[in-house]
Image (spheres, rainbow, N blue to C red):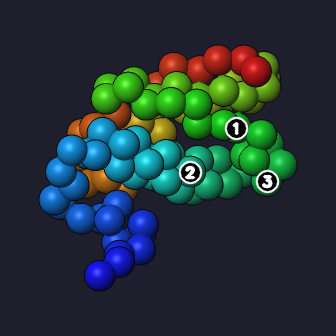
């Protein structure tokens, strides 16, 4: 029987692909956190932010220069929001890169 990707992402038993699914979960949680914490920013600005990678501790985000500065100031709140969406402390820090 086939299962949808959304079902697999929320499954507690991920097997050998755990890191991949965790990275996808973190990416989805980061998008939700950006939408909720940065709702005062223009939607085009939020869409310009790219979640580059997640290495198990650090989330790497690419954004335009001024947006990086704004997100850096909000990074503590973003980290807390991402971890609250995930239900546990997964992301320890966020690194921003201009791009």
Q: Is residue 51 above or below residue 25?
A: above
**Whole-percent x and y of residue 16?**
21, 44
User: Which of these two is toward me, 71 or 20?
Assistant: 20
Between disc 3 and disc 2, whose residue precedes?
Answer: 2
Q: Is residue 37 above or below residue 3?
A: above
Task: Identify residue for label 1.
Answer: 49
The residue at the point 42 percent across, 66 percent down is 5
Nearer to us of marks 3 and 1 is: 1
Task: Identify residue for label 2.
Answer: 31
Between disc 3 and disc 1, whose residue precedes?
Answer: 3
Pick the quarter of the image with the C terminus. Answer: top right
Secondary structure of the residue carrying numbered label 2? helix
Left or right, 32 with reference to 62: left
Question: Distance between the Cα atoms at labels 3 and 2?
Answer: 12 Å
Q: Residues within 10 Å of mark 2 (few under 14, many from 20)?
A: some
**Whole-percent x and y of residue 98?**
72, 17
Task: Identify residue for label 3.
Answer: 43
**Whole-percent x and y of residue 74?**
55, 32
Question: Distance between the Cα atoms at labels 3 and 1?
Answer: 10 Å
């Amino acid at each position: 029987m086939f299962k949808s990707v959304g079902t697999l992402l929320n499954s507690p038993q991920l097997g050998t692909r755990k890191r991949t699914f965790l990275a996808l979960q973190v990416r989805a949680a980061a998008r939700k956190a950006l939408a909720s914490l940065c709702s005062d920013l223009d939607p085009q600005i939020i869409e310009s932010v790219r979640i580059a990678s997640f290495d198990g501790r650090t989330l790497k985000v690419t954004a335009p220069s001024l947006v990086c500065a704004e997100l850096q100031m909000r990074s503590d709140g973003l980290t807390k929001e991402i971890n609250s969406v995930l239900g546990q402390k997964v992301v320890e820090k966020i690194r921003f890169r201009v791009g």
